[in-house]
Amino acid sequence: MNLAVEFGTLHSSSLGQNAVAIVLYFAVGVAIMGLGFVLVDVLTPGNLRKQVFQEHRPNAVAVAVGMHLALAIVVASSIFASSLGLAQGLVDTIVYGVIGVLLQVATLIVLEVAAPGRARDLIKSPTLHPSAIAVAVTLFAVGIVNAAAIS
């Protein structure tokens, strides 16, 4: 019975390249999610960042959370489906991610047009409204469909 453990060889160059890739993909992912937040902010009345972090508006939080969860899934799928080459993989991730952001924005616009009343007006309300949850879940569902389409 042999109890020896085989560690193999260490390749510091590939480890360094992978560490750089992680940082670059992270930066691209954060930028895409930031773009999504900015565009949602443009589509909603008032300053979304202030409503979420200072005024603690639950409807603003619900919509922002739905958007960020959706975009995180889209970004993760974009990274997973991207090319093995780092440069092409980053470009793939940026293109797929921006398309995902635009589809999420389109979803908000369609909801604004199709839903009765003005969904955007509920963002500033100090009490949680079921419509905000419906918007957040819709954004999340669209993000899942986007992610599946990427893979």
Image (cartoon, rainbow, N blue to C red):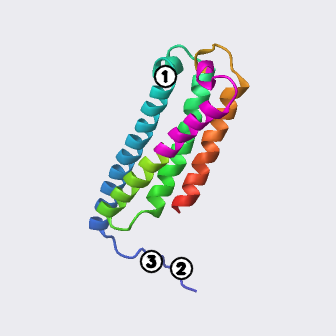
Q: Which mark is residue 3?
A: 2
**What residue did someone put label 3 on?**
6
Q: Nearer the viewer, mark 3 or mark 1?
A: 1
Q: Earlier in the sequence, mark 3 or mark 1?
A: 3
Circles 3 and 1, Cβ within 8 Å, touching? The answer is no
Span shown in magenta: 102-122
Q: Is residue 122 left or right of residue 47?
A: right
| Type of amino acid under label 2 | Leu
Q: Is residue 127 above or below residue 108?
A: above
* Outermost residue, right side: 130
Which of discs 1 and 2 lies nearer the camera? The answer is 1
Name the secondary structure under disc 1. Answer: helix
The residues bearing labels 3 and 1 have C-alpha atoms spaced at a distance of: 54 Å
Kind of residue sitting beneath label 1: Leu
Q: Which residue is mark 1?
A: 48
The percent coordinates of residue 78 (x first, y second) are 46, 56
Q: Residue at x 47, y 44 (%)?
A: 102
